Amino acid sequence: MDINTPVPTIYGDQLEKFGELWKKQVQTLKEKFGDAIEEVLFPKEANTDVPIIFVQAARIIDVLGFMKNDAGFEYGFLADLTATDEESAPRFHVVYNLLSRKSMSRVRVKVRTDEENAVPTAISLWPAANWAEREVWDMFGVRFEGHPDLRRILMDVRWEGHPLRKDYPLRGYQIFPTPEAIDPSLLNY
Amino acid sequence: MSKDGSAAYFTTRVDAVVNWARKHSLFPLPFGTSCCGIEMMATLCSDYDMARFGAEAIRFSPRQADLLIVAGIINAKMAPVLKTVYDQMSEPKWVMSFGACASSGGIFNVYSVTQGIDTVIPVDVYVPGCPPAPEGVLHSLIRLQEQIQKGETVAQRRERQSRAGTLKSIT
Ligand code: SF4
């Protein structure tokens, strides 16, 4: 695909609207965090609709916190927290889709990680990240450091493996006819 | 009494009478989990009117129902729930597997969907289609009634086995 063909996006052509703002924001991030910003993919230069900012796992909470609270960013809304299996080292990208309700612009922050290395949890910034991180753990087996309750959220507790990994068989059925045992301590909240 | 007033009688077996009574008063529990549930509602409503076959008294508690209509996709996470609902129904109980998803997984040939509810609970009658037409549902209801009359359903076989002491497991 020619990188100059506009990427179809449900949000319309954002580059026209937010191009200047994004450039300024990326510049600020690079100045402030230096090496922690590993790579930036910009619309038109790469095949993407909004800027993708790759951040070092160790500094991700600093960067996200800055982007959430700084007056020039105000990305206060965590639209989605998910992951992708890239099948190349490092294996996973944890994806944070952010929306600023002030400028209505969106950016995508990514962290590269693998099975062994945990990513710091974003619950301190957005409590809603709790279940999203549990889902990422359930589906991809990415661990989140500091997460208070990293249990499976969708699959059965007896499930083996992480079904959205590329090497998980599409038809890897695991059907349990008996109800799953619930940890009794969870009922006393 | 015959028509001219003379005494007449016919002989039958008790279980034939019991089965005849059972087949005309099925109490369905609608276990509608997705799109097939809509078609099940259509079948129950006045246009197709399952009441004509004595199966109009919908019960939403498994303890009051004897026909489990599983209409829709049963995910892996739902399988234990379905099994529990089935176990809670009192004997004799029947199961209708409604639509492609419940019968075989349908188009969802993936890790998260049971490939047919018969991997979890025994099924008496399958209704093909995605979703099945209400006529098909009525057809399979009549088939189920025929089976009940003949005493060939899973629950009735189980009943006979348990009387004979040859029942191995309850499902
Ligand atoms: S068989 Fe078709 S209509 Fe029925 S639940 Fe499956 S997908 Fe929906």
Image: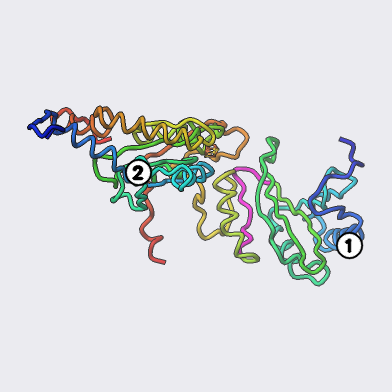
Crowd tier of the residue under label 1, counting other residues whose Cα lies within 10 Å: few below 14, some 14–19, many 20 or above: some
Prevailing secondary structure class for the magenta stretch in the rendered image: loop
Crowd tier of the residue under label 2, counting other residues whose Cα lies within 10 Å: few below 14, some 14–19, many 20 or above: some
Point out residue A86 in the picture as x, y percentages from the top left corner. Answer: 70, 38
Point out which mark residue B32 bears: none
In this view, the residue in front, A77 or B100, is B100
Dot 2 beta carbon under 8 Å from ligand 1? no
**A56 part of magenta stretch:** no
In this view, the residue in front, B102 or B149, is B149
Rendered view: A88 above or below A53: above
Label 2: chain? B
Residue under the point 69% across and 61% down: A78
Point out residue A43 in the picture as x, y percentages from the top left corner. Answer: 87, 49
> Could you tell me if residue B33 is visible in this image?
no
Q: Is residue A102 left or right of residue B110?
A: right
Query: So how many labels did they put on this image?
Result: 2
**A118 part of magenta stretch:** yes
Kind of residue indicated by mark 2: Ala
Read off the residue under disc 2: B55
- Secondary element under disc 1, as helix, strand or loop, is helix
Read off the residue under disc 1: A21
